[in-house]
Image (cartoon, grey):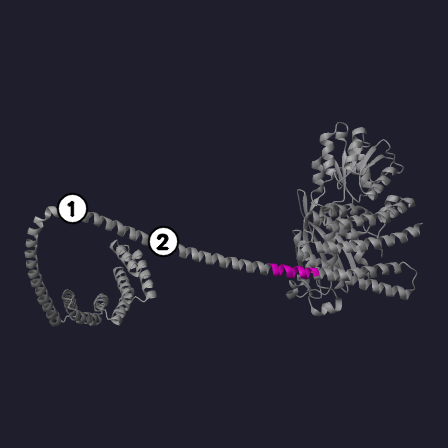
Amino acid sequence: MGFTYNNIGMVYVQQNKTDEAIQFFEKSLAICQSIGDKEGIGTSYLNMGAIYQDKKQFYDANANYFKALEIYETIGDGAGAIYAHLAVGDIASINNDMSQALIHFEQALELTKKTGNREEEKNIYQRLTKIYARQKNFEGAYNYQQLYVNLNDSLYNSEKSSLIAEMSTKYETEKKDKEIGLLSKDRALQEVKLSQQRTIRNFLIISMIMLLLLAVLIYNRYSVKLKTNLLIEQKNEELKKAKDTAEQSLQIQEQFLANTSHEIRTPMNGILGMTRQLLETPLNTEQTEYLNAIKESSNNLLHVVNDILDISKIRAGKIVFEKKEFQIVELFKSLQFMLQHKADVKQILLETKIDNLIPTVILGDTVRLNQILLNLAGNAIKFTDKGHVTISAELVSDFNNEVRVKFGVSDTGLGIPDDKLDYVFESFAQAEVHTTRKYGGTGLGLSISKFLVEKQGGHITVTSKVNKGSCFSFDLQFEKVDFNLSTASMSQITKIPEGVNLSKIKVLLVEDNIINQRVALFELNKWKVSTDVSEDALAAIEKLKTNEYTIILMDISMPGMDGIEATKYIRNQLTEPSKSTPIIAMTASAVSGEKERCFEAGMNDYISKPFIPLTFYKKIVKWSGYEDVNDSNDIESGISVRTKSNKLIDLMMIRERASGDVEYVKDMIKMFIDLMPEYYNELKSYHDIKNWEELGKQAHKMKTPVAYFGVEELRELLSSIELQILNETFNEIDIQQRMVTINELIINSIIELNIELDRIS
């Protein structure tokens, strides 16, 4: 095979394709080295040296010639050694190294005389003549020239004698050839054919060799590619295992945090509940102080646990943001109400400042905004011993349907060193170690606040000077609520008239939740509105086929056909006048785009549950045509300030609706006590069979009654379950833990309501 590669290389040399030739000589060298063919190795080095010499790469040429010379001297190949010495001498001559050239030419001459190669001897004499002439050693040059001439003449005479003998032989042969000329024609033709066959055979052999070489190259490439692919697959598998291990570790960590926090929350809720109950009983001063200390410590521990749960949710990507209408004024009132006691204890001023240019009602996540401000303001009060804490809101921009508001919390407290300003936003971080010992806390509040701000597209910053105070500020974008009404029309209805009579209005209430039915019917009956009730959409459609109504109040989330589908059916399948009856959507959904879905389905208006009676009254009046009121939007307040209480429940909303009707309050409490366990059992059954869609719907169904009774923690849990299922971001373990908490909150709420029912009875 090495001989074949050398031959192919010589073919490329004849075609002046030196690059291709050198590749085949190198392959020949590799093969000869692998099988120990010394002669083939020497030939390959000589051929490569010749190529490099032609390319005038004399250094590479000389290196290859020396390697060839070493091989030939080792194996005693005189002819090969002669060619190698001559090649090295020629390179030395080109490089003007005459002494080195003479050494190699004389060694070649000595070997030539031993082998009897007189033609090569003559050529060496000529080379030596030129070397001595270049060295201006004309005597040496003359002597070698004479040797050249004498040897040339001798070779010529010998050649001439051989030629004469050859001519004589040819003459004799020619005469014989003429005699057998005719007989040899056939033989000549056969020789031609044989020659052609040999040519074809040689061509086929070369072609097969080329194909074999091509196959070898393809196999080598395939082999390399296969090994590379196997290596890549192996690395991918290792990466996948590492990723799975990391995810499993993170899940275990999150589960541990959630489980641990939950195990702490459960007894803490019991402690807080029992403490609240004890504080409602007659106590002496010392007992009250002890119970308040227990309550404060429990609240602090619960705050720590809540922080841990929040950071666990953040890491798991489970934080969901809602969009609800709210008023910054009311939010600030609530904040001041919650924080005022702490400020009073430390004898510092707590004040709020709101830019008058900020729209009255805006759309955003009031719960998360409240959490951020509560964290920042709580910290400000904690680290301020004298002076004041200010919570502010300033309009930054008002463009199209959006506003950007900058919120700030400034204080005159301890301040933060410059080198700690960035560090304070990290998890479990506080400016100084002694701060934790003196003031307590987990160091998670600012980290959580930063996350909540940035996830809503905002940016939080801090400026501070030691012993002078700090200022935390962040900006958030909100949607404006478009009222489309004038000051005059707004003033038409500012409160529900006494003794109002809307008996001319006939309403179809489509609502499957009994508590929600009771709440709506109580208001409608007070206003003497004629009302029919349907517990599902199909029953409502049957009523519409035989009755005429002024307004349809349509719940969105119902079993079977929901409110959206029912509205589309009414608009497309029923006949007039039912087809055009105004439809007002009633929903507790916090999903973004819910209002738009209602309008696209053909509904005329939208009211959120739990609704404010005045807002509900305005909607009824507007769409009945009873009075000309152009108020087309739900202007209910996003936040109501709850009265300070140690209880889970807050009956403020129920009492406002009752307007002094004690029987209504008692009926609503009894309904909650009777129905809520049933609702929970349905919720649990969906959870047990992992019917997540129905679980989300049931959570939605329970949310509004819970909100009427002011059980805010329970409402938030139900709302988060509903949103996570709708967005497909839920975690089964997290849902399971929330189910336990929901059950506990329902049980404690019912206990409080039973006590309240006994009291008012």
Circle 2 crowding by C-alpha within 10 Å: few under 14, some 14–19, many from 20 = few
Q: Which of marks 2 and 1 is in front?
A: 1
Asked whether residue 32 is drawn in magenta, I would say: no
Dot 1: element: helix
Say whether residue 439 is left or right of residue 19: right
Three-letter residue code for mark 2: Leu
Decide which of 590, 341 is in the foreground and name it: 590
Query: How far apart are the two marked residues, 2 and 1, measured between alpha carbons?
Result: 42 Å
Q: What stretch is highlighted in magenta?
A: 244-255
| Sequence-first disc among 2 and 1 | 1
Say whether residue 502 is left or right of residue 427: right
Say whether residue 705 is left or right of residue 9: right
Q: Residue furthest right?
A: 761
Residue denoted by label 2: 214
Residue denoted by label 1: 186
Asked whether residue 250 is drawn in magenta, I would say: yes
Q: Vertical placement of 371 versus 539: above or below?
A: below
Q: Residue 83: x and y, percent?
A: 22, 66
Q: Which residue is drawn at 86% across and 64% down?
A: 291
Residue 357 visible in the shown view = no
Q: Which mark is residue 73?
A: none
Three-letter residue code for mark 1: Asp
Circle 1 crowding by C-alpha within 10 Å: few under 14, some 14–19, many from 20 = few
Decide which of 761, 42 is in the foreground and name it: 42
